[in-house]
Image: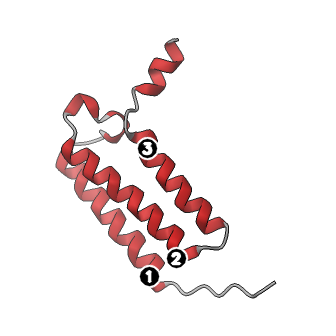
Amino acid sequence: MRKWRALTGLGPWWLVALVVAGGLTAVAMGHIRSGGYVAAGGVALAAVLRAVLPAPRGGGLEIRSRWLDVLMLVVATAALVAVFTLVRIRIPPV
C-alpha cells in the first residue's frame, strides 16, 4: 500500500507521461511529424496543468516556482514544435 501512495504522489505527471510516451511511440512507428506534435502537446498539457493546479495537487510537475516551471515547459513545447516542423526525414519505402 505504501508503494501505491508514493506513485499517486506524482499526481498529473502520469497523464503527461502517457501522452508524451504515446507521441514518442508514434515517432518510433514512423509517424515522425504527427508523433512529435503529440509529444509537444503532452508537454504543453504539463504547462497548463502546472499553471492551473494548486500547489499540493501538482505532484511531479512541481519542481521550481510555478511560473518558472510554466515558462520552461512552454519553451520546451516551442522547441519540440520547431524541431518536428523543420526537420525533414525521408524514410524509404520497404
Q: Nearer the viewer, residue 14 or 68?
A: 14
- Pointer 2 or 3: first along the chain: 3
- The three-letter amino acid code for the residue at tag 2 is Arg
Please name the residue shown 40% across and 41% down the image.
13
Please name the residue shown 26% across and 45% down the image.
50
Query: Which label was assigned to residue 43?
Result: none
Against 4, residue 73 (above or below) is: below
Tell which tag, 1 or 3, sits nearer the viewer: 3
Are dots 1 and 3 in contact, CB under 8 Å? no
- Pointer 1 or 3: first along the chain: 3
Protein image colouring:
secondary structure
Asked if residue 87 lies left or right of residue 31, the reply is left
Are dots 2 and 3 in contact, CB under 8 Å? no
Callout 1 environment at 10 Å: few (<14), some (14 to 19), or many (20+)?
some
Q: Which residue is mark 1?
A: 85
- The three-letter amino acid code for the residue at tag 1 is Thr
Please name the residue shown 46% across and 21% down the image.
6
Q: Which residue is mark 3?
A: 15
Asked if residue 61 lies left or right of residue 70, the reply is right
Q: The C terminus is located in which quarter? A: bottom right
Q: CA distance from mark 1 to mark 2?
A: 7 Å
Against 76, residue 5 (above or below) is: above
Callout 2 environment at 10 Å: few (<14), some (14 to 19), or many (20+)?
many
- The three-letter amino acid code for the residue at tag 3 is Leu
Query: Which label was assigned to residue 33?
Result: 2
Are dots 1 and 2 in contact, CB under 8 Å? yes
Callout 3 environment at 10 Å: few (<14), some (14 to 19), or many (20+)?
some
Against 24, residue 63 (above or below) is: above
